[in-house]
Image (tube, coloured by chain):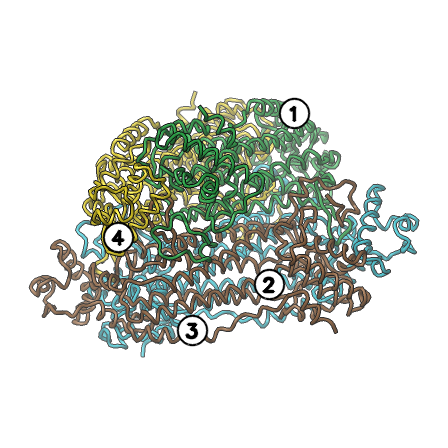
Chain colours: A cyan, B brown, C green, D yellow
């Protein structure tokens, strides 16, 4: 137990159990770099604005450089008595440079400081996420290019519905990820606002240069209401909502990977490097990566819910509840990034069994809609054509026949519009016929691929300003 | 029980219990207008593209006009046997115009049809939500203007922290709603994409003019991957995530309304028209509106979670699970809109007790930070100034004195930097001193008000294209 | 708008928008029977205790009988101006018997009244749920009896793992439902506590006979702390938690029904009466019931979450937020009951394709563990046996052979412990070998079936006391 | 990277990224003791049943003792290459005793092994939770005893409603915790079932003595369906549901602690050892412990949701998704235990300001209901008495008077039933009048206290069998 920097007003020391319960250092030490980066710029600004003497500002930033060096070297042992990363850094700084360290917190509160730190972290997390999304999208586009003519069974209700091109299927996920990217970019814009200078809640009584601080830390905006600035965690909620939707997309692909890997479907085989075995059953090759992504999705939803619930009904401005915004957020950020990356490798290395997919695509009366459309083109209202073909399917199933096995006589028993038993019904024909914008015909899919490739090339990485404390010290030295 | 339009392939009729279990008509009849609007434009397009004869297209749209008239007149009794709004409209149409009604479903599936209907509904819901947000923001700006000089106790940890202007507090909520607006506008853009033409999953084998359909229904884009188009509910998730965050903001304001209405705080009094009484306690005047908004927030979170969970792990493309996307979504849309509107009225009519707020703002050692900053300006490191004032506060509390009650001698016992006992410490001084961008000083707040007013004026309503089936029939008649 | 019964203290009437926003009558009218039942017994008790004259008590209960008759006859039109079911019933009563109706609310608050009503409803809901669970269990036991020798592929990671008996698989769900039953029974015990007499929060200043009220309404206990009694919704949370777990079990079975219905798996065929078709694809026969149950599960989770969030952080005692406890709860109760019932029908009518299941169970190296266990019995450590058989499987797969296709020479190349190529490896042998308590051997499964049947027979229905207001009037007439 | 024990069937090594992604050792190393305890008993049983030679069984258990010693001594460095705690222990054992270690996994799969480990952990977690609940309850009973006559303002809608005894208020929380205890005890019963012997999913082909294993590990039952046994996580869901409800109760108390600590309410003062200060505002004393408990509640809900979502729709039997059941569960178990314990300390040390509470309890027309009941006793129907007193309150408020300030003439202007202006209305009278079972009258509360104390004494700790591997080795040596 150590004497707390805020203990002036207190007569007793904090109970050790309370110290352990309230400390966040085990979680927020992850923000050390961001915290020190913010402190470097804050100290420089205090010096520039003559709020503290320039020499003291210099002493502080140099001390911070040393603290950062120690942390990087693993020479710092964080303990609950340090409360949080902010107090820890200040205490470490005081060990280096003595009482002048006490000037760093001038015109600043932990409330605006932690808001700064998480915003810096969020910005980086979003930039990395968007990059990982793009890499996964690149894999999907390559797969689409490889499978621009691979016939695949399309499903609704997990029943074979109509044949599609496998490229078309991969591009559906490309689209989802494209929307994910857009959501993350928008979330970035709202995270990219600089809160320092909001003080505890009301602003500070010092002539700060907030714009300069924002510029040095690479922010494009400055918060304009101090009460909101210390209370706002919208950017974390947005990140987590976007992450939940993105994990949802991965979980759908995961479900398909699991299904397609079964011997029953058998459309793909995962690479040995992306599957694992059983401790007891020697034959097993399990799609663990896909299963885990599907399983982790639940946790990501839970963290979103946890933060929504935490913030619900909190009066302004800062409340200690908000300290608990970090564990779930960090877990989500890690999970999403790892999931995106491991999926890219898994998809890039899996093998597709084209023969088996082609075979499945043509069976199970998957061409029945085409037959109905054939009748429609001969003038039958769609609803009647549907009924007629439905009966034909029922008849064929009762005879254990496929549609192309039926004789002309059998066809005509259901509709006189059939004038030949060679209807040219193939999966290829079916696919080619869907030549409408967004449809699965080869030409449409080729256009989708081209557009996807273009989108990939045009997407620019999000800015991820350099927050290395030493670089900031150099850059802000005038 | 009626014979189902898809019953060709079936030997038995649906079990009545199953019929009731699977029917969605009780929920989705709310989409009648959207469904008919979509059908009008679809039929017109089929005619224009000569997929069906022009005269039949005309017969269909006129029949649809009659169906819509019947529905509006309350002359239609929807029953579970009708399954859903799509089948119901087709059945009603057939009663009007006979078998040619069966041509309406040409080149269309319920999968792309329902995607269209919900997107149309979502667009309207978002437009209405944004409008309601703006109205609430307008009330907040008016309140800020009225209270540009009202001193109010600012809280952290629900302890009095520092005085603020009440205007500043109201503007914090303006900021939150400003971000809400931005999120809804972005969600609108992703909802504003036309899916019809995607068929069941693979596109359709007819020469559709999807761009024309989009244009008539006021969409700015067309979906480009049919598998994705029928599987995608991102726009609903986004709406619900944005709604959850917006309700969260309202719930925080609700908490404050409840607190401020207590006799203990006593900062506001709700208008009689916005409060209710007790069945047993005659004296009670309860802030029910605020409590209900806070309570409804939980449900809105639950609906978001429900939809995320529903979609998690679903393989492509359409699965019947997705029918359950509507109950929670409709409930959320209704709740959010009603909450925004009733809050506008509640805030506009409440009375603020300025005297009481002013009094509270100056008490409880709320000016201690100012005292520390005073010492900092005299050269003491902030950390030491904090400790010194902390001890001073502890001393004052032990004497049951406020800071301004202390004598110079008592001040100097804690620091020789005090040279007068008239430190000019008032809530007004404290507020005025926080003259930093985003701070609570009157000039800063006035600038925030001006910016808020500007933002309100510049915000343009979202497009809410007219979907009245009769108007669409007129507009699409060439 | 009508004058509110609590309006004495108010100068203005409630704003109509507020009236609509705060009214719960559209939701809680469902509690009419429970509310009137409670009022009948309360009035009788007031008379017996001479808190009101016996003649007035009689007038009140007779008036209540008429009100109930009107409601049952559909002659009552509930409107938002009536606020809630409690006020509505009192107002209707006043129309029947005049000002003496105003005595019914003596020694009662809506806070304890609504607690009573929901507890009565919850008790009934749980009793019905347990009954529906038992019926579904009965179906499962019948299926197990039919399939006591049906070989079925057992899966882990959705990969064929080891053969099991299909009976064993059905009984796994029996076990889950058995735990569900236990949870609901425990939840019942905590709902079965009578709260009336707690007043608004502090008890009432009248000599009530709470035990008599409890007895008449069939409660086994009486609440013992009035503050807790009006604040407590644990029983709703418990119901919803138990319902979430039960729906989770159904969703797992639903997933299997969907999988087994695919042509790829093909182990079952749903009855036509329990499947539905497609609006566009004539061949489709979709497992909609299973999909919908899976989809509705998300909503049930959402409602649990919604109620947890609603209650989180509420100070004692009653807060208006709690009015929002009902929509989600009613929705969950309806969903769960309907899902259990429709599943019973769906399972009872589906056909199992034994041939196909048997075939799948023997393929895919599903007997590899048996081979490893063979080597273990010859002395090899399990870990080495596992490795040896793993390599054997890899070799066989590379040769496109099943294990029983390998020659002795091929076996011996992997281990000299193989002394014959006739290892008697069949799915039947594999199943029979797992003759351990809880294992899939026929004898074990037969014992499980017998135990299940016994448990079914021993399970007693939960008490569902008769709450018909007329019967209560008769029963309480002394 | 190391060669995996299941790698026989694989040609390539696992990708390092996949190894890191799929490893659970960082999380499940926490189960080391439970895992080794299970292995000790399993090995002993294999020896007793002559499935492996007795000498080998002895070698294994002695090796396990050494492994446990190394782990306890911190001499083991767990790495992702070890996959999980099960494989890690087996690998460590092999280092100690060579290939015979490979016999430990005979007749066992990781699927039943992990089910065993979590059940052992859950049992301990529940036992510790119930103990912590009882300690917190003991504090509440002591507080109730101290405040058996402390008048306190009772609230509904956070408006002063009626006076109560503070003891009554504390006992409301005692009741909640009593229900929590019951739920945890029931959850314990369902966790207390021994799954080992279920193998991967189908049971094992060895003559196990499952009952003996259960007995040694202190289980009261054995699972009876192997498929269910490896798929079932109901006990985790139940634990988390019970934990969510318990945290909900704590969050309500936390909200009250935060409110009561404000200067506006001012009913309590937390001990310095249970509060913390501000980094910037020297005067602050914040109720951080209460805020953190309230904030952590959101996460606990999120983890429940996460697990429900994870399991939803999973086919039988084991799927890798289930590995993700642990992080949220462990976090919840830690949070709940710490919260219960720190709350006990916080409540035991806080000071109650009786004067202030008494004063508040008598003001704000909190006795209006008593006045209405006075009129009722004089024969007025309650509804009219309510209206009359409502108007009286409105009148008094308009005159800025309390009820006891009114003159007889003023009273009589509202009802002629008032015959004296000395109505004896005091908070003490009001409290004493509520002398009904569960009411707040001193006698009733004293009875509640006595019952609570009895319940505390009668509650027996849950069994927490000793799982120390060395003790188990000794105990199972025959």
Question: Of the numbered discs in the image, which one, if any, rests on residue B314?
Answer: none
> Which residue has dot 2 on it?
A137
- Please identify the quarter of the rendering in which residue C40 is found: top left
Q: Is residue B347 visible?
A: yes
> Which residue has dot 4 on it?
D396
- Give the SS element for disc 1: helix
Quadrant for the C terminus of chain A in the image: bottom left
Local crowd size for mark 2, using a 10 Å CA cut-off: few (<14), some (14–19), many (≥20) = many
**Point 45% across, 67% down: residue:** B135
Residue at mark 4: chain: D
For the residues carrying marks 1 and 4, which lies nearer the camera in this image? 4
Question: Distance from label 3 to label 2 (Cα)?
Answer: 28 Å
Question: Of the numbered discs in the image, which one, if any, rests on residue A220?
Answer: 3
Residue at mark 3: chain: A
Local crowd size for mark 4, using a 10 Å CA cut-off: few (<14), some (14–19), many (≥20) = some
* Labels 1, 4: one chain: no
Question: Distance from label 3 to label 1 (Cα)?
Answer: 71 Å
Give how far across and how far down residue B307 sits, in percent.
55, 52
For the residues carrying marks 3 and 4, which lies nearer the camera in this image? 4
> Is there CB contact under 8 Å for labels 1 and 4?
no
Give how far across and how far down residue C263 sits, in percent.
73, 44
With respect to residue C88, does B390 lie above or below? below
- Give the SS element for disc 3: loop
Residue A424 left/right relative to B337:
right
With respect to residue D41, does B303 lie above or below? below
> Which residue has dot 1 on it?
C442
- Give the SS element for disc 4: helix
Residue C392 left/right relative to A196:
right
Q: Nearer the viewer, residue A278 or D186?
A: D186
Residue A325 left/right relative to A251:
left
Q: Nearer the viewer, residue C62 or C267?
A: C62
């Amino acid at each position: 137990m150590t004497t707390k920097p805020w203990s002036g007003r207190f007569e007793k020391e904090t109970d050790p159990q309370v110290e352990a319960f309230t400390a966040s250092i085990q979680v927020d030490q992850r923000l050390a770099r961001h915290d020190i980066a913010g402190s470097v710029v804050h100290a420089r600004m205090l010096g520039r604005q003559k709020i503290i003497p320039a020499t003291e500002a210099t002493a502080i930033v140099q001390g911070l450089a040393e603290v950062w060096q120690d942390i990087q070297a693993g020479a710092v042992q964080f303990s609950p008595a340090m409360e949080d990363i902010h107090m820890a850094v200040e205490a470490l700084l005081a060990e280096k440079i003595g009482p002048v360290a006490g000037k760093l917190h001038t015109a600043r509160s932990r409330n605006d400081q932690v808001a700064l730190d998480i915003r810096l972290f969020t910005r980086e997390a979003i930039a990395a996420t968007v990059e990982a999304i793009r890499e996964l999208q690149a894999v999907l586009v390559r797969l689409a290019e490889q499978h621009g003519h691979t016939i695949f069974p399309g499903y609704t209700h997990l029943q074979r519905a109509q044949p599609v091109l496998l490229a078309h299927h991969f591009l559906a996920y490309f689209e989802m990820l494209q929307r994910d990217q857009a959501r993350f970019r928008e979330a970035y814009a709202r995270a990219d606002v600089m809160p320092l200078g909001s003080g505890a809640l009301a602003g500070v009584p010092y002539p700060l240069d907030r714009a300069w601080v924002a510029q040095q830390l690479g922010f494009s905006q400055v918060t304009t209401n101090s009460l909101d600035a210390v209370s706002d965690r919208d950017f974390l909620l947005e990140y987590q909502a976007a992450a939940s939707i993105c994990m949802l997309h991965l979980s759908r692909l995961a479900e398909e990977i699991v299904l397609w890997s079964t011997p029953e479907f058998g459309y793909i085989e995962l690479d040995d490097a992306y599957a694992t075995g059983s401790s007891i059953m020697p034959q097993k090759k399990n799609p663990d990566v896909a299963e885990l992504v599907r399983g982790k999705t639940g946790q990501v939803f839970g963290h979103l819910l946890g933060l929504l619930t935490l913030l619900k009904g909190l009066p302004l401005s800062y409340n200690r509840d908000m300290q608990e915004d970090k564990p779930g957020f960090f877990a989500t950020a890690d999970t999403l990034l790892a999931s995106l990356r491991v999926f890219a490798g898994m998809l890039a290395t899996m093998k597709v069994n084209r023969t088996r997919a082609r075979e499945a695509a043509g069976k199970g009366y998957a061409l029945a809609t085409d037959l109905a459309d054939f009748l429609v083109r001969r003038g039958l209202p769609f609803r009647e054509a549907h009924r007629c073909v439905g009966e034909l399917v029922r008849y064929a199933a009762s005879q254990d026949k496929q549609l192309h096995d039926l004789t002309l006589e059998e066809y005509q028993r259901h509709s006189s519009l059939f004038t030949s038993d060679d209807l040219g019904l193939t999966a290829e024909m079916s696919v080619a016929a869907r030549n409408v914008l967004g449809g699965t015909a080869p030409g449409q899919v080729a256009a989708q691929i081209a557009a996807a490739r273009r989108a990939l090339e045009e997407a620019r990485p999000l800015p991820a300003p350099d927050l290395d404390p030493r670089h900031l010290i150099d850059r802000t030295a005038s």
